[in-house]
Image: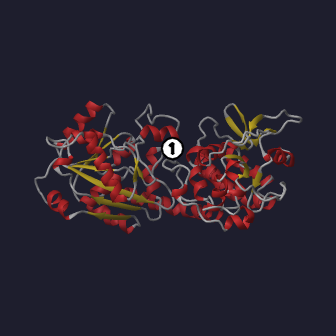
């Protein structure tokens, strides 16, 4: 799709000349909020920061303060109020909302037309009203901008003060950027301060000698949502508890739901741990949880109906901590699960047997072989959860244990809270999952692996078995396979390799 530049309104600070005939070789200066995002309010992004970094109380204060923000206007004083409420007292060195949480919501709010217009240019400079720490990672990773014009936040002793850094009088340009084109016509331009508000914009855009792009509010609202397949790079990892975009109305609905959601959560939780699975399953369904299971007839006859069947290994992708529990409900038979990072609380209350692995290959192999000798076992070879329609690389250790392997495809749909986290408190994962009004679990039991697709004599290697099972589950779910691992996920979301001194991270 080729954007029609002639129909797009340019900034009032720039001469209304027509866009260059060949914008690919030009440098584009664009306003992030005014060009790419479809929404006209910045409130949802500050609510995400308040909730994920500050907690429920801070986000409630932000919501109650919004009438004042609306009265004074979001662009100036209202923006400073939201910045103060969201950032004051937040630790600077652990703040990863801009790279781990916000990119998902920026992408979902991105307009197709604005994105295509921006991506037509090889070199891009973005300006933003939001603090630099909220937007810089996203703009560089998902829009490939070369420079970001945004303000920094003041900090003291490692904590944000909730106010913008101010421009000092007669400040020397903070950096120089080469904005030349492929033809070699270089222009060096000094950008003063940390935000477009502090820049002599007419002089800035005159020196660029290119063009600036900004859409009107009406044009942005009429933009189509950017399809996932058009993302500059796929969104695979993201963190945070909120599964919806917290607009003013939806944030109000969230706080109205919380008291009832907490009651429902504890009812579901207690029912699940205090009653046998065959009794708790219908009660959970009555409370609003939905479980859809499917099993092939061959698996039904060869696995489920054999009284003496022992040591069946169920291999599943990993969506939440509750995967083994829902698999046991669908299978209607006892089984055990191995884990890496289940908290002590969740271990104590789990209605099925859980055994902690050590990440020592030989020792873990012995543990799982022993478990298989006593009954059925569920393993999740991804080693960590993934929320998006992708599967991480499968560890091949499971392929060495037995030739009785049944792949299981698992998917989860939630509307309000994610039941997983990379940087938060993992013991709260099942509570957040059960606080959703109607969480849905999809369990699809696949065909047992044929002998030639296992590591047994005449079969294939353990790595080939792992790749085969991964592809089978991907095909059943309509997902995409990746070579990414647990370490890749935690480096992106938490800045570490997913290992805690108290217990290993899953």
The residue indicated by pointer 1 is 424
Q: Is residue 270 left or right of residue 423?
A: left
In percent of width and height, residue 211 lies at 77, 52
Q: Is residue 27 visible?
A: yes
Residue extending farthest to the front is 183
Q: Is residue 239 left or right of residue 219?
A: left
Residue 47 occupies quadrant: bottom right
Residue 44 occupies quadrant: bottom right
Residue drawn at the location 40% of the way across and 35% of the way down:
503
Residue extending farthest to the left is 308
Residue extending farthest to the right is 170
In percent of width and height, residue 114 lies at 66, 59
> In the depicted view, which residue is nearer to us: 503 or 484?
484
Residue drawn at the location 17% of the way across and 59% of the way down:
304
Q: Is residue 274 visible?
A: no
> In the depicted view, which residue is nearer to us: 23 or 136?
23
> In the depicted view, which residue is nearer to us: 104 or 220?
220
Dot 1 surroundings within 10 Å: few (below 14), some, or many (20 or more)? Answer: some
Please tell me whether residue 278 is drawn above or below residue 209 in the rendered image. Answer: below
């Amino acid at each position: 799709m080729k954007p029609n530049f002639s129909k797009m309104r340019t900034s009032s600070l720039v001469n209304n000349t027509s866009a260059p005939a060949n914008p690919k070789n030009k440098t584009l200066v664009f306003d992030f909020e005014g060009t790419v995002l479809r929404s006209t309010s910045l409130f949802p992004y500050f609510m995400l920061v308040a909730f994920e970094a500050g907690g429920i109380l801070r986000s409630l204060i932000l919501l109650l303060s919004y009438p004042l923000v609306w009265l004074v206007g979001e662009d100036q004083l209202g923006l400073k109020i939201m910045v103060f409420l969201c950032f004051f007292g937040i630790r600077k060195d652990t703040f990863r909302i801009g790279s781990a949480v916000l990119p998902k919501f920026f992408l979902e709010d991105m307009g197709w037309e604005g994105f295509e217009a921006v991506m037509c240019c090889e070199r891009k400079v973005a300006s933003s009203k939001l603090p630099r720490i909220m937007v810089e990672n996203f703009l560089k990773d998902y829009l490939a901008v070369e420079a970001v014009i945004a303000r920094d936040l003041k900090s003291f002793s490692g904590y944000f003060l909730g106010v913008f850094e101010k421009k000092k009088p007669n400040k020397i340009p903070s950096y120089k950027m080469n904005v030349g084109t492929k033809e070699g016509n270089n222009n060096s331009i000094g950008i003063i301060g940390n935000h477009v508000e502090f820049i002599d914009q007419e002089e800035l855009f005159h020196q660029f000698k290119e063009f600036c792009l900004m859409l009107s509010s009406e044009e942005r609202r009429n933009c189509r949502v950017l399809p996932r397949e058009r993302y500059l790079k796929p969104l695979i990892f993201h963190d945070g508890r909120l599964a919806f975009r917290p607009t003013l109305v939806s944030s109000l609905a969230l706080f109205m739901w919380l008291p009832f959601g907490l009651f429902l959560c504890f009812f579901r939780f207690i029912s699940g741990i205090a009653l046998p699975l065959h009794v708790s399953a219908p009660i959970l369904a009555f409370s609003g949880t939905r479980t859809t299971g499917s099993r092939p007839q061959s698996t039904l006859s060869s696995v489920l109906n054999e009284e003496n069947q022992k040591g069946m290994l169920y291999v599943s992708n990993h969506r939440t901590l509750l995967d083994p529990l829902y698999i046991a409900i669908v299978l209607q038979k006892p089984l055990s699960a191995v884990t890496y990072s289940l908290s002590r609380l969740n271990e104590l209350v789990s209605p099925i047997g859980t055994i902690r692995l050590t990440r020592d290959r030989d020792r873990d192999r012995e543990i799982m072989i022993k478990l298989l000798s006593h009954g059925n076992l569920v393993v999740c070879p991804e080693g960590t959860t993934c929320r998006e329609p992708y599967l991480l690389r499968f560890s091949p250790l499971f392929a060495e244990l037995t030739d009785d392997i049944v792949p299981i495809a698992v998917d989860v749909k939630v509307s309000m809270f994610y039941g997983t986290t990379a940087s938060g408190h993992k013991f709260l994962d099942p509570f957040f999952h059960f606080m959703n009004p109607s969480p849905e679990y999809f369990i699809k039991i696949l065909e047992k692996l044929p002998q030639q697709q296992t590591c047994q004599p005449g079969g294939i290697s353990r790595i080939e078995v792992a790749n085969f099972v991964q592809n089978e589950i991907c095909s059943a779910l309509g997902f995409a396979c990746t070579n990414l691992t647990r370490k890749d996920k935690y480096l992106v979301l938490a800045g570490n390799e997913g290992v805690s001194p108290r217990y290993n991270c899953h």
